[in-house]
Amino acid sequence: MKTLIFILAFGSLVAGCKEAEQPAHDAVAESAPDGVEENETVDAKRMPRTSIRFEAYTHDFGTLQEGAPAKHRFTFTNEGKHPLHLGHVEASCGCTTPQWSKDAIAPGAQGFIDVEFNSRGKRGQTFNKTITVHANTQPEVTKLSITGEVQ
């Protein structure tokens, strides 16, 4: 009897693990080719590749006063033949916050990545922060950077 219970429990566990192996983002990539909702992610690896060109890949804030707002908008163009999807944009540290175009960018259209640097507590420091952009582009990852000095 114990053997039967063990076999049934083990079988249920294996079946549950098989279901958990299916990535949740597959449905999002299939169901949202024209854009994504704010709480969804895009599996950019499964989409047709396109091409992205930024107007600038770096921005120098120069000298900032500590605590002063430091914001910059990186603008890009989809230079490919397929809609461009930004899957994820991340900053190299918590003092830098990116916001980006959530909808698909049509070929020839422009999108943005807004970056905000928090200079509070950074007096006397020179900074060089990286923003990593994951998209359905070739190459898949694009690096942006912001620099400056806090007085």
Image: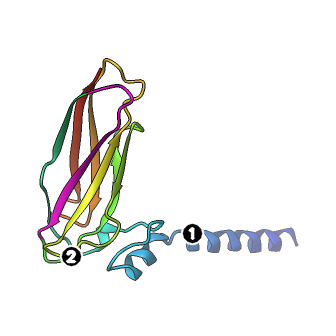
| Residue 138 appearing in the image | no
Residue tagged by mark 1?
20
Q: Quadrant of residue 96?
A: top left
- Dot 1 or dot 2, earlier in sequence: 1
Q: Write the start and end of the magenta stretch as one range.
A: 64-79
Residue type, numbered disc 2: Ala
Report the residue at 82% width, 71% height from top.
Answer: 5
Report the residue at 33% width, 79% height from top.
Answer: 33
Drawn side of residue 136 relative to residue 57, left or right: right
| Residue 109 appearing in the image | yes
Q: Quadrant of residue 92?
A: top left
In the image, is residue 6 part of the stretch drawn in magenta?
no
Q: Residue furthest bottom?
A: 31
SS of the residue under disc 2: loop
Which of the two residues, 84 or 38, is positioned nearer the viewer here? 38
Q: Quadrant of residue 95?
A: top left
Counting from the top left corner in percent of width and height, residue 39 is at 48, 66
From the image, state whether disc 1 or disc 2 is nearer to you: 2
Drawn side of residue 12 relative to residue 136, left or right: right
SS of the residue under disc 1: helix
Q: Residue furthest top?
A: 124
Residue tagged by mark 2?
106
Report the residue at 23% width, 30% height from top.
Answer: 148
Residue type, numbered disc 1: Ala
Quadrant placement of the C terminus: top left
Counting from the top left corner in percent of width and height, residue 9 is at 75, 70
Q: Give the overall secondary structure of the magenta segment.
A: strand
Real-space CA distance between mark 1 and mark 2, rounded to the nearest whole angstrom:
34 Å
Report the residue at 36% width, 25% height from top.
Answer: 66
> How did the renderer colour the structure?
rainbow
Counting from the top left corner in percent of width and height, residue 14 is at 63, 70
In the image, is residue 68 part of the stretch drawn in magenta?
yes
